[in-house]
Image (cartoon, grey):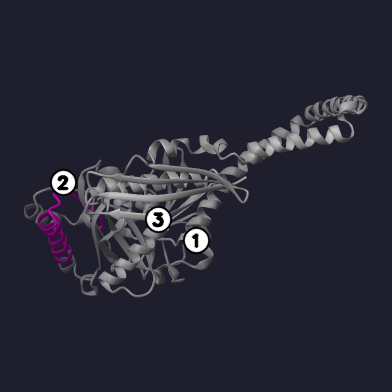
Amino acid sequence: MGTLASAYCTDTGAKVVLFKKSRKGFVFQENLTLQTGGYRFPELYLSYFYPDLVLETVRIPPVKDEETINILIKKKLADTLGLTGNYLIVFEELPEESTPTEKVFRVFAIPEEVYRNESILPRDLEEHLMIFTTPHFSLHGVSRVVAEGRTVLHVYADDESLVMTVSRGDEVLYTRGLKIPPYTKTDEEAYADFIYENISMTYMFVAQRSNIPVDFILLSGKLYEKENLINELIPSVSCGIATPLVPKEFKKAGPIVFLEFLPCFGNVLLDQKYDFSPKEVKDKRALRLHLSKLIPVLTLLFVLSLSMVGLEFYKFWNEVQEVTQLRMKVLSSLSALSTYTPLRGEALNYYITYMDLLERSRRENPLNALPQIENLLKEISAKEYVFSYKNEKIIFSFVVESRFESIVDLLLYREKLLKHLEEIRNKGFLYRIESEKKALKENRLYMRIVLEKKV
């Protein structure tokens, strides 16, 4: 298994942890402190501290294509928040708030210029990148594993950054990041006061204003050693406070390194849905990973095939001999057939024409294609059917006219019908909706649909 690097970087430096992959997780090798951009390793998981992460709830029409969802969400962000320029987004649907006519997403966004900043991600490292995220989600990677489905406020702080993420199971509910003020770096009491104030404010916002009951608070980074901070927090919150233990997924990692380098550990536990990489980068990565798995298999097959060459050549030679013998028999049969009187001259032309007409009749008969659209016809219960053949095409025209109990039933029926038509397209048919009328007050739908297939 190869070595991979997971880095957490700010504008002033980077924390890096090196792992070896194992079948059941990761084996810790070494922790490093480097300059930002200095993590030149063949497989890189990277989170960058961007405190102004955008968090917004967005409502859009129900669409299934992910690229269209991306476009609609970005337009909503621009309209709602006035964002300018291009943004990279990750999002998750909120099923409990979505309806058949509206999808609701929790959206996180960063400017694309953050990703394009070569001091953060040098371009020659892009092809080695496995994920580009922020520490808001790195914390979630650990919380998801150690909290076992409970709602947790995970707080990480070092000398440069303070990050707080509320999550439950696979869902990130709320997150916030702040830079550590310069005046606190030489004043321990001021540092603890700053951390306490922001944890308390975030806890109150989440528990009271957002009505999210927090089961416990996790403290990581350098907070595990701040006993005064912990003692001050205990009476001001109504939940437990703890530091996360090293998950079983990581072997040979000590508890102090785990806490101080926690975003690096969280990066490798993240799902790809929290990756801010542009689509073209994700596509190249997916292809690269696919090929990396395919090449060893092809190599094995090639080695095995070499050992079989002698045997296969022998079989091939025997088959050539059999084909040669069959060819001689066919030529002999054709020679005998040519002496049969009825198949000569005009009689032969008659039979050829007759067979051509039979074949043409079979090919142009539109009823022959009915089995391919049988499921659609059963589903729609059309009011009118017309089958025909024209310009080397079989044509099916049918009329759907139904009244429904509610507008939701009407829309669901229409969506199901369009889904069936898309499935039929894969069988070589083209379809078009020649006319459509929706009487919404009466919950009535009328559609004339035409299917065509070239033969």
105 left or right, relative to 12: left
Query: How far from the left and from the top, in percent, is residue 97?
Result: 22, 51
* Type of amino acid at the residue the image marks with label 3: Ser
Query: How far from the left and from the top, in percent, is residue 31?
Result: 40, 54
Disc 2 versus disc 1: nearer the observer: 1
Q: Earlier in the sequence, mark 2 or mark 3?
A: 2
Q: Quadrant of the C terminus?
A: top right
The residue pinned by badge 1 equals: 280
Pick out the residue farthest to the left. 235
Q: Which residue shows up at 47% across the image and 62% down it?
A: 39
Nearer to the camera, 371 or 395: 395
Q: Which residue shows up at 55% across the image and 37% down it?
A: 367
Q: Earlier in the sequence, mark 2 or mark 1?
A: 2
Please say if 243 is above or below 310.
below
Mark pair 2, 3: CA separation: 56 Å
The residue pinned by badge 3 equals: 435
Mark pair 3, 1: CA separation: 39 Å
Please say if 429 is above or below 313.
below
- Say which mark, if any, is on residue 96: none
Tell me, yes or no, whether the two marked residues, 2 and 3, touch with CB atoms within 8 Å: no
The residue pinned by badge 2 equals: 215
How packed mark 1 is, by other alpha carbons closer than 10 Å (few <14, some 14-19, many 20 or more), is: few
67 left or right, relative to 343: left
How packed mark 2 is, by other alpha carbons closer than 10 Å (few <14, some 14-19, many 20 or more), is: some
For mark 2, give the secondary structure.
loop
| Extent of the magenta region | 193-222
Nearer to the camera, 135 or 349: 349
Look at the image and say whether residue 299 sits in the magenta stretch. Answer: no
Please say if 82 is above or below 233.
below
